[in-house]
Image (cartoon, rainbow, N blue to C red):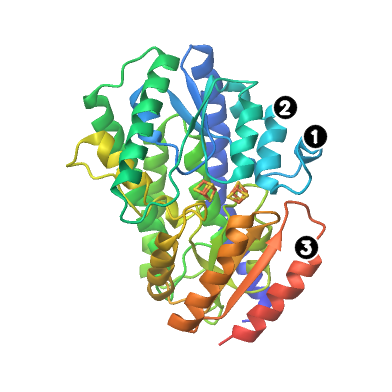
Amino acid sequence: MSYHEDTAKSKNMRHEIADSFDEFRADQQLKLKAAWQKGKKICGVYCAFAPRELIRASGAIPVSLCGTKQEPIPEAEKILPRNLCPLIKSSYGYAITWSCPYYNFSHFLIGETTCDGKTKMFELIAREKPIYVMDLPKRVNNSSSALAYWLAEIRKVKKFIEDQTGNTITEDNLHKAISIQNAERILLKRLACLCRGSHIPITGLDMNRVVNGKGFCVDQGEYIKNLEVLTKELEAKVNEGQSVCSEDASRILLTGCPIGEGSEKVLRTIEECGGIVVCQEACSGIKNFDDLVDEDKEPLKAIAERYLKIGCSCISPNTRRIELLDRLVKEFNVDGVVDLTWLACHTYNVESFIIKDYLNKRHKVPFLQVEADYSEGDIMQLRVRLEAFLEMIHR
Ligand code: SF4
Ligand code: SF4
């Protein structure tokens, strides 16, 4: 099969699957407005460290406010330095232009002291809306004091959520919220793992759309039901031997900074150039649903433990990311790793060397780091580099 036929094949599969999740997202936006009009509290979150179970257990709705589009960046650059990562500028741009309905509907916000740029941006956002910025310990490995500190932060954010919503977070509601959130993670993982075999039922681009939907659902049960339907459909396709790409398409693991709707250009370009992203490790991928909250433990402690395991580059040393990549490279039988660093993201940029060194020594897997921003200005250069990489690793 030629490259062009291959791409056409992917496009046909793409519409059918992506449409239902695009419709779901549009519908949830209407539901969010209706919930807001009825006085339901909305909580905006910016990061994978925000404990969504606590928000749901209070009766509030968590929505993702992580900026993933270029449009609001010029406004943000009037206040923020230009050499900040696009994710921070986009998030802040939405806040000051009031052009994101999810931000506009949010009654209160939760942030975290992850990287310096984001931490300082929250000081500016605090002028607009009530926000609790969770103080994230960075040296977490085998550290009981880090866990104790983070648990105290979990307790503080619980109190903040209760104060903002006027609702007490009961143990019963928390158990229910944990169980539902775990069910969502289990399904997302089951879906993601369908790409481990030689028949790939979904493109990385579609998978990204599906996973992205979780950040915008008013009705979490409906999202989970949609996931179940999609997973079963795709399992059937795998059993029938169907694939969205040719058998010799290079299997790529995408790692690094998170991506979302509007910032998928690297993912898209990989697939347009004939590769297939079989796994996304970033916070917009498996990193966010690999670990569960232990339902047999005291809930707040279990939440603290689960969230402190997130392998973000702000953690030092970030051994959890290496452990996860170690597993994913093998499980997904990857031909190459692409590490996306948003321009001016120092933590992921520095960590890229460590990741490359580890993967080269341990797995001898080809590795390419790409730095990019949200604009389309570098798309040709990206394409040339990705094409050359894919050509080099083609089996
Ligand atoms: S990469 Fe780190 S800072 Fe960014 S969303 Fe993930 S956990 Fe948060
Ligand atoms: S991509 Fe990097 S610089 Fe940007 S918010 Fe995430 S950790 Fe911070």
Query: Nearest the camera: 11 or 131?
Result: 131
Label 1 crowd (10 A; few <14 / some 14-19 / many >=20): some
Residue 70 appears left or right of 352: right
Label 2 crowd (10 A; few <14 / some 14-19 / many >=20): some
| Residue annotated with mark 2 | 96
| Residue 1 quadrant | bottom right
Q: Tag on residue 75?
A: 1
Quadrant location of the C terminus in the rendered image: bottom right
* Residue at the (35%, 56%) spot, across then down: 141
Q: Position of residue 149 (x, y in %)?
A: 35, 38
The extreme front residue here reads: 145
Q: Mark 3–mark 2 contact, CB under 8 Å?
A: no
For the residues carrying marks 3 and 2, which lies nearer the camera in this image?
2
| Residue annotated with mark 3 | 379
Amino acid type indicated by mark 1? Glu
Looking at the rendered structure, the secondary structure element under dot 3 is helix
Q: Earlier in the sequence, mark 3 or mark 2?
A: 2
For the residues carrying marks 3 and 1, which lies nearer the camera in this image?
1
Label 3 crowd (10 A; few <14 / some 14-19 / many >=20): some
Label 3 and label 1: CA atoms lie apart by 23 Å
Looking at the rendered structure, the secondary structure element under dot 1 is helix
Amino acid type indicated by mark 2? Ile
Residue 252 showing in the rendered view: no
